[in-house]
Image: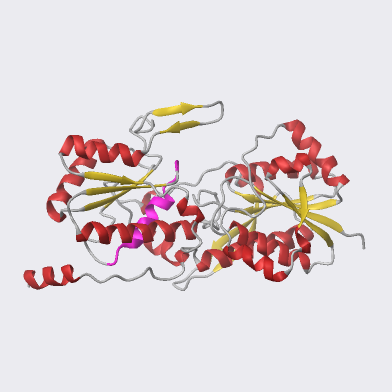
Amino acid sequence: MIKGNMLVVHGGGPTAVINSSLYGVITEAKKNDKIDKIYGAIGGSEAILKENFLDLGKTDEERLKLLLQTPGTAIGSSRFELWQDDYDQMVEIFKRNNIKYVLFNGGNGSMDTCGKVSKVCKDHDIYVVGIPKTIDNDLSIIDHAPGYGSAAKYIATVTAEVGADVKSLPIHVCVIEAMGRNAGWITAASALARRKQGDAPHLIYLPERPFNEDEFLEDVKKLYDELGGVVVVVSEGLKNKDGESIVPPIFKTERATYYGDVSSHLANLVIRKLGIKARSEKPGICGRASIALQSEVDREEAVLVGQEAVRAAVAGETGVMVGISRRPGDEYGIETFLVPIEEVMMHEREIPEDYINERGNDVTGEFVKWCKPLIGGELNEFISFKDEIEEETKA
């Protein structure tokens, strides 16, 4: 039997579990007698063109286990723009390095790359498989993507902790900004912070609904008068009824537009229009880099899709991505399946309407029920003697 080499490539922004998928790839590939060297592209898709490969199969098991607790990506990533000539060139690079199996681990953009690479390789006995990864959870077809569960746990934990702080000194409005420009899955997960009525977050605003400034101020004022302290969680991608960002662009390049902070804008709005003290918080990439708040469920599923990608490629599958589906029933469980890559290339999955309340300032119980298993258990429980004395007073 002639063995072939395997290459794994990371693309786009890291997650708290992308290295767990890498662990799954390496450990599974080591067991397969059809695979010789297990290369990592050191620096994303650009590394393919530079042939910057490292044999990860030489790493011993104890060091490999560190991948399960390593933030970022251990082999590096990139947002390098590829052209048709680059894709054509890759075929010869793969052949020159005896690479028979290529795995792309990433989100929408990486799956687009995966699809284009599989197309140029289809007649050359080179098998290309995608591994899902995104904190934004916006990959279509699948139930959820590895990376999201940990990001959800992070935003829920931060919201619960900020909520406890604001409740203990209820003098201001706090606006927390979550990542996810076009899809509000992370923002929505802040709802998992609630244990009882009145807990933060008090308002949630997603990019799937046009943002109404007047309604926002009305909601904030009403809650402030009632509670004293208000916690609002918003998406970085909030747009008005015309589909434009609620904050103006501050810098543009050929490939991207950069906007100001939505949370700062809304906090300043509360100060100017309502005369209420307000502040903004933007965890940003902390939410995708936190190993301390990594979801155990997320980590295990990330390992699994890495393993399944190896099995699929060696079995001769190509132009597919490993997907996750949820088993029916009340007890949480998943199965993996293979998705034709054309069905996920650059398709963004937004939050469905039945997960958003009528006014557009919160999520529904259906969303909470769907999301809760992904964070891998309950959040830390807090005690408030202030709550106890307030309940006694009411009684």
In reply to whether residue 369 is colored magenta, the answer given is no
Q: Which colour scheme is used?
A: secondary structure
In reply to whether residue 186 is colored magenta, the answer given is yes
Left-right relation of 279 to 67: left
Residue 327, given in percent of the width and then of the height, sits at 53, 68
- Rendered view: 86 above or below 15: above
Residue 308, given in percent of the width and then of the height, sits at 68, 63
Q: Which picture quadrant has residue 391?
A: bottom left
Res. 222 in view: yes
Residue at image point 22% right, 63% down: 197
Res. 366 in view: no
Q: Main secondary structure of the magenta part?
A: helix
Q: How many marks?
A: 0
Residue 315, given in percent of the width and then of the height, sits at 78, 61
Which stretch is magenta?
181-195
Q: Which picture quadrant has residue 262?
A: top left
Residue at image point 60% right, 46% down: 344
Image quarter hosting the C terminus = bottom left
